[in-house]
Image (cartoon, coloured by chain):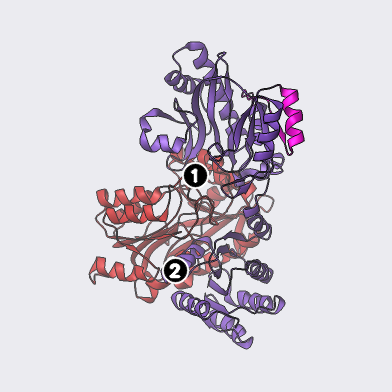
Amino acid sequence: MKLMEFQAKSLFSRYGIPVPGGTMVESVEGALEAAEKIGLPVVVKAQVMTGGRGKAGGVKLASTEDEVRSHASAILGMDIRGYEVKRLLVDPAVKIARELYVGITMDRGRGCPVLMVSGEGGVDIEEVARKTPERISIVPVDPVMGLQMYQARRAAFEVFAEKKKAMSAAKVMLQLWSCFAGCDCSLAEINPLAELADGRIEALDAKIVLDDNALFRHPDLAEMRIPQPDELKELRAREKGLSYVGLDGNIGCMVNGAGLAMATMDLVKHLGGKPANFLDIGGSSNPQKVIDAMELLLSDPGVEVIFINVFGGITRCDDVASGLVEAVQKTRLDLPLVVRLTGTNEEEGRSLLAEAGIEATTSMRRGAELALQRASEGGSA
Amino acid sequence: MSILLDETTRVMVQGLGRDGAFHALQMSDYGTNVVAGVHPGRGGDTESGIPVFNDCRTAVEKTGADCSVIFVPARFATDAVLEAIDSGVGLVVAVTEGIPVMDMSAIRTRLEATGCSLVGPNCPGLISPGKAKVGIMPGSIFAPGKVGLVSRSGTLTYQVVKHLTDAGLGQSTAVGMGGDPITGLGLVDYLELFEADEETEAVVLVGEIGGSAEERAAEYVSEKMSKPVVGFIVGRTAPPGKRMGHAGAIISGGSGTAESKVAALRDNGVPVADTTDGIVDLLREQLGGNL
């Protein structure tokens, strides 16, 4: 789960990391009030869950009340990479002497968290990693012991020669670790961590991604979720125990298991078709899940054919079949339906489907081919 | 032979809720030596004839269990895994999905300290056909043989195994290593085990988007393996930044794509099938009729 900048900054300040002390607002009037309270000049920043805000014109310096008004009204409602701006963060403007990068992420390869520090701040760190990897210090962190003072100090002296500055940067790194571990983050990033003209250090931007698996022990953080329009369907699906990701094709796929669901999409594409979605109904044989999944597929106007691919293991084919028959009746399905059903109790499952007039194949390839054929025929079944 | 698991393995089942109790019986029916159940508060009971204990250590002392399979819900699963490691078993299989990644990182340090092996979490377990199965795989689709299989997924494993079995290509051991960003044993570990296993003559590696385990596995194959390996990678159609069901199946910052994994495997001499049914043909080519 991603947080917006203003949320991440509020978590940072809980852990003592110095942040500019801005205000999140949702209107031009709010921006004006915030600017008055903070004192000009201010920075008006679009709050969206994507990078590239600066390039898109979503971050502007305002030195007068008129500028606050014009920037706020220009940025609110702006579309940044498909995300509509509904919130602004008004931060006090600061004089920057230097920009650094400090981040902590979970390194899958090493199996532990890593602290990353670079003197190249304010730019895309992934690009720095690709082009000049020697400019990033990477420090593996023991997940049980946590980031140690000496590790942070060493990384800090790589970017600051002066003791006082290095020590305050090291302190921020340790605070960032406390935040990362305390909130179960999969990423906590300060880019840039700025050295200000007056010598202080401040986190001018903040990015936090929380581990979804750990939200059960952070109910307060779970409540911070701001659902994005493209996630609404995914979230609704998750509430029903389904895992869904929308695409722009016309073949709606319903599959048991994430790996098989990806393989199904890939096969549809391999054969020249276009999958409309990823949809994993999981391992349960609960007929209600099949009905929910069918409704989810039908809510996508792009879907022209439904392809169901089930490999019964623990999931029994007859259970899936009875759920499917019920789903077809309940949703009054009028789209072509192709079913591939194999595995545990497949004969019982296929005969249940046959009684309801639904044809089923046992081959995944044959099923995908049929789905493509029905899609090219178009129209309703 | 086979890897990690055979007919002598003594299995205990942690968490005898609906799933745990069901699969304890399924495993036992398949021929697995299920010797104990562990369920706090049910010590002294039996479950389908299997003695139940309150804790792992007692179960190991009383029954000589050397493997534990975990069906405990996610919020209690970290504790269950640590308890299993602490009880002295050599192999832990965590079926549970949803363990926090920070906990997995901490668990890894315990695994390194003790030498215990963990399969999963978020996995269907493993099976050495004809000998034993630990986890939730449907035994009937497997057949004993000489192909080792390692996969990050569950039902996709079944799909691939069905092609193999239908084609007369039995399996030495098939492992679902789990779909989380951090797992116990990793792809390279399984490849090492298969390389050392006398019974295994070829290996099928089923990978998916996210991370760089397949890339490292590809290098391992070209540098260290004598046995042929055939690959298959899913997620070619997955959009970047979206989690495809498994917690670990996500393309982030342009890395972890299916293309990069396929290219790494092919560059290291590992043929990669475009579809699941293509795996059988590639295996036959690699073995030249030796299976």
Which percent across, then down, holds residue B86? 53, 41
Closer-to-camera residue (B157/A332)? A332
| Chain B palette colour | red
Q: Place residue A6 in its image quadrant.
A: top right
Dot 2 falls on a residue whose secondary structure is: helix
Question: In this figure, which residue is indicated by the disc labeled 2?
Answer: A267
Where residue B255 appears, x then y in whole percent? Answer: 43, 47
Q: Is residue B86 left or right of residue B204?
A: right
Question: Eyeballing the image, is A207 above or below B93?
Answer: above
Residue type at the position of mark 1: Gly
Give how far across and how far down residue A58 sits, in percent.
60, 38
Q: Which residues are magenta?
A: A15-39
Report which residue position mark 1 lands on.
B88
Colour for chain A in the figure: purple
Tell me which amino acid carries mark 2. Answer: Leu
Q: Is residue B157 magenta?
A: no
Q: Nearer the viewer, mark 2 or mark 1?
A: 2
Can you see residue B200? Answer: no
